[in-house]
Image (cartoon, helix red, strand yellow):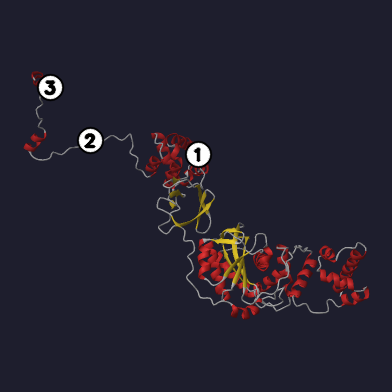
Amino acid sequence: MLQRTRQFYERMSIYTDIHLLREKEHRSIQWIANYLGLNFRTVRKYLKMSLEEYEKYADQFGQKPRLLEDYKDFIAEKLRHYPDTGAAQMHDWLKEAYPFFPEVCPRTIYNTVMEVRQEANIPRVSVTERDYHVLPESPSGQYAQVDFGQKKLRKGDGKTQKVYFMAMLLCRSRYKYIWFQNKPFTSETAVIAHEKAFEYFRGIPKEIIYDQDAVFLWDENIGDYIMTKVFDAYVKSRPFKPVFCRPGDPESKGKVENCVKYVKQNFLTNRPYSDLETLQEQAEAWLKRTGNAMVHATTCKIPFEEWSSECKDLYPYVAVLLPKEDAGHAVLKTNCVRYKGNIYSVPVGTYKGKDTRVRLEENGATLIISSMSGGEIARHIMPAGRGNIVTSDSHKHDSTIKLAALTETVTSLFSDKEEMTMYLSRVHDRYGRYMRDQLMTVSDACTGRNQEEIDKALDTCMKRGLFSANDFKAAINGNVISSTKEKTEVAYKSVGDERTTAIAHFQPGKSDLSVYDNIVSCR
C-alpha cells in the first residue's frame, strides 16, 4: 500500500511539473517531454486532463498485474551497461535471451523500459530523428534500394573490429536483407551480396536505386554513367535496371538509409563480435525475428507478410555461379610476393607452405599486404616500372622481439650476470650485425640444460677466448677440445712391399737451369 501511495504522489508531481512548465514558462510539449524524460504524447495527454481527471487516472495505476515484472532485472542490467539502448532493441534482446518470451505490444515494452529507467535513475538518451518527405506507395516488385554501412564492434579481448555490410530493401514491402564482411566492399563482393539478397528475396526487382558509389560507378557526366567493368558485366547478366541518385540527394533512397540506421541501432549496437560467420548467422536470425517480423512504423504492416504477396511480382531468380571471393596472392618460399611485375618482401616466417596466401591492397602509392583474416603484415612504397625487388630490413628477423629485451632474457639464464654481460660485449664486438642471431643461438643451446651445464660452458668460453655463439654451443655440448691436451703421435703404416716402397721414395732427377741458358744463348 505504501508503494502504491508513493507512486501516486510521484505521478501527481509529474502532472504538476508538466502544467507549470507549460503555463508558467510557456515551454513546448517536445521540450517538456525531453526535460522530464517522457513521450510527447504522454505530455499532451496530461495537459488535456483536469486535476480531478488525472487523480482518477493516476489512482488506476498499480491495479493491473505487470506482465513484464519478471524481466525488469534483465532490462535494468542492460540499461546500466548500455544506457543508450532504445525500447525496440531491448524488445529484440528480450526475445533473443528468452525463447518463450510472451507476445506483447511494442508500447508495453516502451512503458516498461521507461519505468525501469525512472526506478533505476537511468536517464534516457535523446536521439535527433531525421525527417523525410512522404513518397507515394511504390508498385509491387518494381523498386529496391541498396546502401552500405559500417560499424565498430567490440571483441572479447577488448579490441574493436570494424564490420561492413550491404543492405537491400524492397520498397513496397520493406522486406530487407543484409550481408556482412570484415573489409570494404569492392565491385566483386557487392555482386556476391546482390546474389545473396536475390536468393533471400526469391526474386529480382525491376529497378534498383543506388548512390553514386565508386563500388558501382567509374565516372558520371550529367546523367551519363560509366559503371565499373565488373558491375557492368553483372548488370548485363541480370534483368534489373540500375538507377543512380543525383549527387547530394539522399532522400531518393531514404527507405534503405533508414534501414541502415535501423541495423546499426537495433542489431549492431553493443553487440559483441566473435567471427564473421557467427555475425552473419545472427543477422539472418535477427531479420527473421525482428527486422522483417515487426510492424513497420510507416506502413503499419509486417514486412514478411507484405513480401509474401510482393515476391510474386519479382523477376524469377535462377542461381548462377558466383564470382570467387578474393583468393589472395601466393607467398613464395623466399617470404615475398609478386605483384604487377615487382617483388615485395614479407616478414620471415610468413611462408607456411605452398598454400600460404595474403591479400594485397593499393592505397595511393602504397601497397598494403595483409593476412587473409585482415591483419596487416607489411606495407611498401610501389616503385615505378617492373622488375624491382622491394624489401624491408625489419622482415629479416622476428621484429616482435626487441634486441635489448632479448639480451636481457639471455643474460638471465646465467648465474653470473656480470660475466655473461662481459661475454656478450665481446661477442657484439665481433658479430655486431648478427647479434640477434648470436643471442638466439645461445638461447637455443641453453634450452633443456641445467644451471651447472650452462655456467660451465660460459666459464670454458671465457677462459679460452671463445667469443662466438657457435663456440658456446660446442662448449655446452662437450665438443670443445682442450688446448692443454697433448697431441697424440700419429703412426703411419707402410703400404706394399720393398719395391713399392722404393718407387714411392724415388726422387726424379733435376736439370740445372744453366743448361737451358746455354741453349738459349747459342741461338
Query: Where residue 38 appears, x then y in whole percent?
Result: 81, 67
From where the camera sits, is residue 156 visible?
no
Secondary structure under tag 3 reads helix
- Residue 237 or 268: which is nearer the viewer? 237
Which residue carries the number 2 mark?
489
The reply to whether discs 2 and 3 touch (Cβ–Cβ < 8 Å) is no
Numbered tag placed on residue 417 in the rendering: 1
Kind of residue at badge 2: Glu
Marks 1 and 2: in contact by CB < 8 Å?
Answer: no
Q: Quadrant of residue 124?
A: bottom right
Residue 218 x/y as whole percent: 55, 58
Mark whose residue sits in front, 3 or 1:
3
Report how far apart the C-alphas of labels 2 and 1 lie in the structure.
42 Å
Q: Of the two numbered discs 2 and 3 on the same chain, state the one appearing first in sequence.
A: 2
- Confirm whether residue 116 shows in the render: yes
Q: Is residue 130 above or below residue 501?
A: below
- How crowded is the residue under tag 2: few (<14 C-alpha within 10 Å), some, or many (20+)? few
Q: Callout 1: helix, strand or loop?
A: helix
Label drawn at residue 513: 3
In the image shown, does 257 or 443 lie closer to the viewer? 257
**Are the two marked residues, 3 and 1, in contact with CB atoms closer than 8 angstroms?**
no
Look at discs 2 and 3 and give the one toward the viewer.
Answer: 3
Instruction: State left or right for residue 409 relative to residue 474.
Output: right
Image coordinates for residue 271, horizontal then vertical, percent: 64, 64
The image quadrant of residue 59 is bottom right
Whichever of callouts 2 and 1 sits on the residue coming sooner in the sequence is 1
Alpha carbon separation for disc pair 3 and 1: 68 Å
Residue 432 sits in quarter: top left
As rendered, which of 30 and 441 lies closer to the eye?
Answer: 30
Residue 221 is labelled as none
